[in-house]
Amino acid sequence: MTTLIINIKELVQIREAGINKVSGKDMKVLPRLKNAFLLIENDLIADYGMMKNLPKINADNTIDATEKLVLPTWCDSHTHIVFAGNREQEFVARINGASYEEIANNGGGILNSAKKLQETSEDDLYQQSAKRLEEVMQLGTGAVEIKSGYGLTLDAELKMLRVIKKLNKNYPIEIKSTFLGAHAIPTEFNKNSSGYVDFVIETILPKVAEEKLAEFIDVFCETGYFTVDDTNKLLTAAKEYGLIPKIHVNQFTAIGGVQAGVEHNALSVDHLEVMRNEDIEVLKNSNTMPVALPLCSHFLSIPYTPARKLIDKGLPLALATDFNPGSTPSGNMNQVVSEACIKMNMTPEEAINAATINGAYAMNVQKTHGSITIGKKANLIITKEVPSIGFLPYAFGSNNIDIVLINGIVVTL
Ligand code: NIG
Ligand code: FE
């Protein structure tokens, strides 16, 4: 099947094959073509160019994008979309003065979500998660990473990962799976993080590997959760099974998680709200992508990742949602891009690079997603009539998307 998009006001994020990520000053450059066409054959981008050079094509479908922009879909490299129930009571408790930390220390937080998830059937969990996945596809996300970590028992972690696998099978969106068994310490381990990490390594990890349920390994390396030693131990064990690290670090405190990530050649280190100079330095000349999650900062009223500092030091940066029931109950990448511009001083070009090509890198889909490149998946956002690329983050809160295509198929309702 062929679909031809014509009269595109601007075709955004066009890249030659082989560009994996953009860093530093290059992030300000977002290559575009005005008055363009784009040809889709089956699920792939087959060709694009200027309207004046449009070859004679008998396409099965034609979409007129007059006054509209076309971008690659968002690559959301960090989510916890599979969860049970919600935590709006904790949200209200925080409004009334309780802190995120106090709530977690009193059995709320991740342990609250884990209890709910353990009591939820696999089918029910699938249905709840599928709804959220459909919502983010409507919002322009075409590739998404999803973590476990609200199970915290062998059965419940496997249940989460099987749900992720089933979502990947049933939906056209590209899904990457991450095993986050070390997300919080279950109550029965009495705050003994290393005891629980041993349990994860000995009991859960081998099963995850045996059933091939995850490509990545994650750990919440944070004061009160898992130490750098725990992190090193887990990542070393996971490497034996070929799992690649993508880890939660520096959300509330800087304890050396970034260094541990770089030492283990992590694909990404995520959160980074609290960054010391040494944390920035160690990322230089590494292959590790720093990932910022501005909606988490927004929702918890915690500092934002110092994006300007990172980019001005020459580093790349990716943006993701962190969609989860506790710290970020939103999977809206459009909002992420806006927030990055408004609160982190990123230009629209930088934010769009961070949410597309760099996001793709942070979840290892850069060969197939993240840019308008011949041969990549035809995963596209066609905007409504908008004056310019800057209008997208500027008109925050508005839905500026007209059509989303995933694998060449329109998925918008
Ligand atoms: O990335 N920081 C750790 N994990 C999640 C939130 C966990 C929760 O509150 O449920 C995050 O923010
Ligand atoms: Fe997270």
Image (cartoon, rainbow, N blue to C red):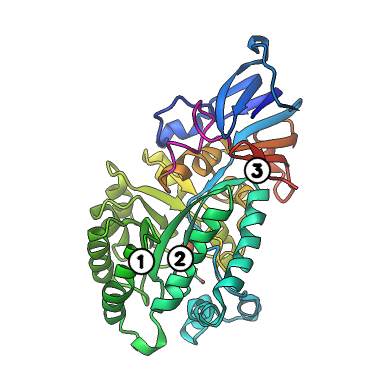
Q: How many marks?
A: 3
Beta carbon of the mark 3 residue lies under 8 A of ligand 1: no
- 360 up-or-down from 279: above or below: above
| 38 horizontally vs 63: left or right | left
How far, Cα to Cα, is label 2 from label 3? Answer: 34 Å
**What residue would you read off at disc 2?**
161
Q: Secondary structure at mark 2?
A: helix
Identify the residue shown where x is 26% and y is 75%: 202
Q: Indicate which label's residue lies in the foreground, 2 or 3.
A: 2
**What residue would you read off at disc 3?**
393
**Looking at the picture, how far across and down is residue 181, in whole percent?**
38, 71
The answer to if 376 sits in the magenta stretch is: yes
**Looking at the picture, how far across and down is residue 364, in whole percent?**
40, 45
Amino acid type indicated by mark 1? Val
Identify the residue shown where x is 37% and y is 77%: 224
**What residue would you read off at disc 1?**
208
**Looking at the picture, how far across and down is residue 63, in whole percent?**
74, 28
Identify the residue shown where x is 31% and y is 79%: 196
